[in-house]
Amino acid sequence: MAQVTSAPTAVEIASQVHEGTLTARQAAEDALARIERSQKLTNAWQVVRRDAALAEADAVDGRPDRFALPLAGVPIAIKDNVPVAGEPMMDGSAGSDPTPQTRNHEIVKRLRAAGAVVVGLTRVPELCIWGATDSVFGISRNPWDPAITPGGSSGGSAAAVASGAVPIAHGNDGMGSIRIPSACCGLVGLKPGYGVVPADLGANSWHGMAENGPLATTVADAALMFSVLAGEPSYASISEPGTLRIALSTKAPSAGLPVSKEWAAGARRVAELLRGAGHRLEERTPRYPATLISTTGMALWTTGAAADAGLLADISKLEKRNARHVGIGRQLARRGFPKPGPQEEWRARATEFFKDTDVLLTPTLAQPPIKAKYWSRGGWLATIQANARYAPFAAPWNMAGWPAMSVPAGLDADGRPLGVQLVGKPGSEAELLALAAQIEQLQPWQRISPLAL
């Protein structure tokens, strides 16, 4: 892979544009060159908007208020499941209508209003259902190790950032789709709590579980992008976290799922660093309902996907595994699922757990990332088993609607990223970012894959 000669952060790019030492056009040209160098390895990009991006950058350079724009000239990737005017929204499916979209999603409007330049759209698995990114459009690969997945469903966005092509990217998370790829690729990824950032994803945002959020290589970049997405500038200013009550849990939310020793050890190392920084630490695990993932989660997941499939131009072109997934969802919907009771019970248990806890710290993944391959050509059951085994920690917090994020936690014995998940109560996004920034200070991480340097 050709080297990435420069991979500045979003904060650095915006600062240079403010100072007049860099133009938005030059930042866009640099990003487009990095995309061209990295795409053969990662296959992260669905659309590269070369001419349109340069025109956007020129428009930013011509804005009289560019010196005050929080993302002035910052090249950014948008996940290919929200509308970007002038581009098709394929959502990883051959059944999507390839006609260019006529409107921009609200988060695209906010990012552009803040001075960001959309250089392209990133690949997803069909309908964003899975935790690995492959589809009829090819296999996306992890820039740290091309044999493994960059995760999903925001895997294209994660690969784009981890390869240094862009400093930040948009993702969304309905069952872990920001945090899982962030952990796979050594990134900071934040899933905001319910209603903090406009969602408007697919038919019903997977019954309100799915949220838009940032993927970045630094906490400062994640906070800056999150502040724009949320329309709240104060989120960009990261404060000290104070003394927090942190619960460490390395037990998977579902019985019988083993947790890798390396991923558990990564979480313990981070926990001990935080203890050393003065936080109060104890080992405690939430009382996850026995049927939270297998029944409640499955009903929400499959019926949400079925609703999204109803938006396709040609549902007959669904992958076989997804046709089964959608078929299950339709059957459950006809029987009145999902029902509100199980989610309410889980939120009550989570609320009880957090009465004397500020942050829950877990491994982000239970096992190393799965292989990068055409999972889309295999069976539904094989995909379900692989996803459930390696990434069970994220989904409970979508079902609760609470904020959660993934933060890098060192490397495993093979030199691949580890990650920890931080979970907080509703409204605690700023607190989670503050704690993540402290982790970054105590245990700095390599921002870009060494294969790209």
Image (spheres, rainbow, N blue to C red):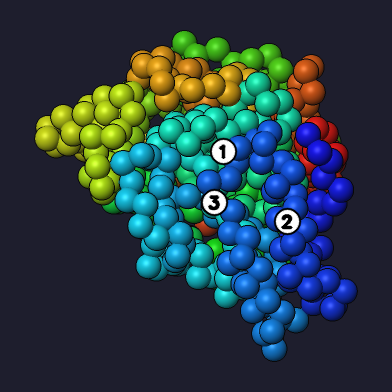
- Say which mark, if any, is on residue 47: 3
| Helix, strand or loop under label 2 | helix
Quadrant of residue 17 in the image?
Answer: bottom right
Percent x, y of residue 376: 42, 25
Q: CA distance from mark 1 to mark 3?
A: 15 Å
| Helix, strand or loop under label 1 | helix
Quadrant where the image shows the C terminus: top right
Q: Nearer the viewer, mark 1 or mark 3?
A: 3
Mark 2, residue position: 31
Residue found at x 78% / y 26%: 411
Q: Give the mark nearest the N terminus, 2 or 1.
A: 2
Give the residue type at disc 2.
Ala
Mark 1, residue position: 155
Few, some or many residues within 10 Å of mark 1 (<14, 14–19, 20+) = many
Nearer to the camera, 192 or 25: 25
In the image, residue 93 sits, relative to residue 21, either above or below, namely above
